[in-house]
């Protein structure tokens, strides 16, 4: 008879395989924003979102993937397939590392991978999973006081997500101080003895500072000189929203596991994590979190905390006693590591119940890229084919990824992520005159254009003043259309509209039922 734990491990493994089958077909439109830089460098010799000097913009938050996209574009490979294979290798590397540092923990590793959110973020084409993986590696390195690993991991994190730039200050401070090895009771009983036991190493801290701050400074200087601003354009496009108490509480709950570090007497690491993750929580609470699919921003906090808790569960020494009476007559001895793993399970359940996504949201994720191929991607490919025939030089579209990537045209992102002009000046006639789009795609529903969103009223007014004519509607969903306007009739786009309606004018349930019969790698393509 098999042990319950073995059965649970097999069940979690089966769930992980199913999750990979269903959700590895997901590729998010935003991934193509970063990949467009590699394509433009290969095709046009420029490092910019647009294939020229128009509107220099640092639209990516992940320069690593932007640079890596040079490889498939230079070699003529399918960029989606390239990053799907890379993502699969990343997932296998994570599983190997997780089981090694956590001494087995196969069940907890499988349960983590079985989360639809994990697979979605592994295969989305964005840096989300790489960020949480490297952050977990950093936390383990700090716990084990491995300076070189911490420095190398931090340097990679700098070119993965800008939230990590705070480490340029935190890491030298962390390695400036050595704390005495005492438990929390001893610290609380003799706090001044703990403080007297602190040892300072300014030379080591300066070495760490030089090793990580100088490369980061060079990175920022390059972007300041090349784009006119050191920070990613998303910083200006998404920040400045009023502080959200609800979001602060929601994200802040993922910091609760820091209590476990305090119980181990690791006050320095607990303080480091509180400042690092607390700053991220504060930033997310004052930001416009666009494309927050599968709890993406909560995942930035949950995943490294979960992995670190499992790691502590495999390493934490000693036991604790729980009693139902004041005199401890009826008491239970529990391994401290078991408590940490139990806390990890609670954290996983909390994320799965609040941020992982409802059935409707998961169906949306599973059908997202099949829909996008028949709408956004086909629009971009059609524009590339007919650009010379109709003398098309630019178009305007708020989804800045697939369509722009395939079109090889200047693309005005009226949402602002991929346009420094829009983040600085908004969508107005001057910006539109600068781009002079020959085609405009406006977000719409069957009832009409959503004029109140993303400056679409200004774009609509401008198209009327320029004598644009309405062409047709591209369908992404039954209730999500892209209404096309152009200076002249473009017959080839009519077939794109018709094909998109045929493919996408259906419910997620019906779409999923049709798509799920095909293996996920059918959609590992541009």
Image: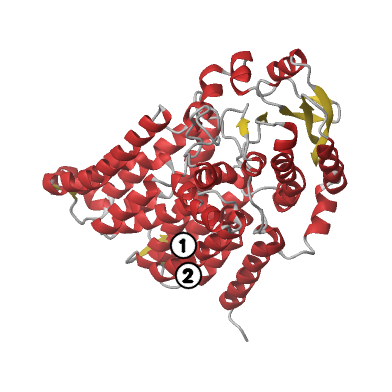
> Is residue 427 visible from the viewing direction of this image?
no
> Is residue 232 visible from the viewing direction of this image?
yes
Q: Neighbour class for label 2 at 10 Å: few (<14), some, many (≥20)?
A: some
Q: Nearer the viewer, mark 2 or mark 1?
A: 2
In the picture, the quarter occupied by the N terminus is bottom right
493, 283: nearer the viewer: 493
**First of labels 2, 1 by sequence position:** 2
Residue located at (47% from left, 44% from top): 62
- Rendered image: mark on residue 404: none
- On the rendered structure, is 240 left or right of 333? right
- On the rendered structure, is 253 left or right of 369? left
Residue 204: image location, x then y, percent: 15, 49
- On the rendered structure, is 79 left or right of 493? left
User: Colour mode?
Assistant: secondary structure
Note whether 319 is above or below 243 in the view shown: below
Residue 488: image location, x then y, percent: 80, 26
227, 197: nearer the viewer: 227
- Per the image, label 2 sits on a secondary structure element best described as loop
Residue located at (49% from left, 57% from top): 344
Note whether 330 is above or below 406 in the view shown: below
- On the rendered structure, is 406 left or right of 286? right
- Rendered image: mark on residue 105: 2
Note whether 51 is above or below 120 in the view shown: above
Question: For mark 1, what is the residue?
Answer: 341
- Per the image, label 1 sits on a secondary structure element best described as helix
Q: Neighbour class for label 1 at 10 Å: few (<14), some, many (≥20)?
A: many
Residue 353: image location, x then y, percent: 63, 49
Asked if disc 2 and disc 1 are in contact, CB closer than 8 Å, the reply is yes
């Amino acid at each position: 008879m098999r042990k319950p734990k073995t059965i649970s491990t097999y069940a979690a493994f089966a769930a992980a395989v199913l999750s990979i089958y269903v959700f590895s077909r997901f590729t998010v439109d935003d991934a193509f924003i970063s990949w467009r830089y590699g394509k433009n460098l290969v095709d046009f010799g420029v490092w910019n979102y647009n294939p020229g000097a128009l509107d220099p913009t640092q639209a990516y938050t992940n320069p690593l993937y932007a640079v890596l996209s040079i490889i498939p574009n230079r070699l003529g490979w399918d960029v989606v397939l390239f990053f799907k294979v890379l993502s699969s290798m990343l997932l296998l590397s994570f599983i190997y590392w997780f089981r090694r540092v956590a001494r087995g923990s196969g069940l907890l590793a499988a349960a983590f991978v079985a989360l639809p959110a994990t697979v979605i973020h592994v295969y989305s084409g964005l840096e989300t999973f790489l960020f949480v993986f490297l952050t977990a590696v950093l936390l383990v390195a700090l716990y084990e006081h491995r300076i070189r690993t911490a420095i190398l991991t931090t340097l990679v994190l700098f070119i993965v997500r800008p939230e990590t730039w705070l480490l340029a200050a935190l890491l030298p401070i962390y390695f400036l101080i050595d704390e005495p090895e005492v438990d929390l009771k001893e610290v609380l009983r003799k706090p001044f003895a703990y403080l007297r036991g602190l040892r300072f190493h300014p030379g080591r801290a300066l070495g760490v500072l030089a090793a990580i701050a100088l490369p980061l400074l060079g990175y920022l200087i390059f972007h300041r000189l090349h784009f006119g601003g050191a920070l990613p354009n998303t910083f200006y496009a998404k920040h400045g929203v009023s502080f959200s108490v609800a979001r602060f509480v929601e994200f802040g709950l993922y910091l609760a596991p820091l209590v476990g570090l305090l119980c181990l007497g690791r006050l320095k690491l607990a303080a480091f994590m509180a400042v690092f993750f607390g700053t991220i929580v504060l930033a997310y609470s004052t930001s416009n979190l666009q494309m927050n699919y599968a709890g993406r921003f909560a995942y930035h906090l949950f995943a490294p905390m979960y992995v670190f808790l499992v790691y502590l569960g495999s390493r934490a020494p000693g036991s604790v006693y729980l009693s139902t009476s004041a005199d401890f007559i009826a008491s239970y001895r529990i391994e401290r590591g078991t408590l940490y793993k139990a806390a990890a399970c609670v954290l996983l359940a909390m994320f799965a119940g609040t941020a992982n996504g409802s059935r409707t949201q998961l169906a949306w994720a599973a059908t997202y890229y099949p829909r996008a191929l028949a709408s956004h991607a086909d629009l971009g490919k059609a524009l590339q084919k007919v650009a010379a025939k109709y003398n098309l030089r630019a178009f305007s579209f708020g989804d800045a990824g697939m369509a722009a990537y395939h079109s090889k045209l200047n693309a005005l992102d009226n949402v602002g992520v991929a346009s420094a002009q829009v983040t600085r000046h908004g969508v107005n006639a001057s910006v539109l005159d600068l781009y002079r789009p020959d085609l405009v795609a406006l977000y719409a529903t069957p009832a009409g254009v959503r004029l109140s969103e993303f400056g679409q009223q200004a774009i609509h007014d401008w198209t009327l003043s320029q004598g644009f004519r309405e062409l047709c509607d591209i369908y992404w969903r039954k209730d999500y259309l892209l209404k096309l306007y152009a200076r002249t009739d473009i017959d080839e786009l009519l077939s794109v509209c018709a094909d998109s309606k045929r493919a996408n004018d259906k419910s997620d349930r019906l779409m999923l039922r049709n798509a799920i019969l095909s293996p996920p790698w059918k959609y590992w393509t541009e």
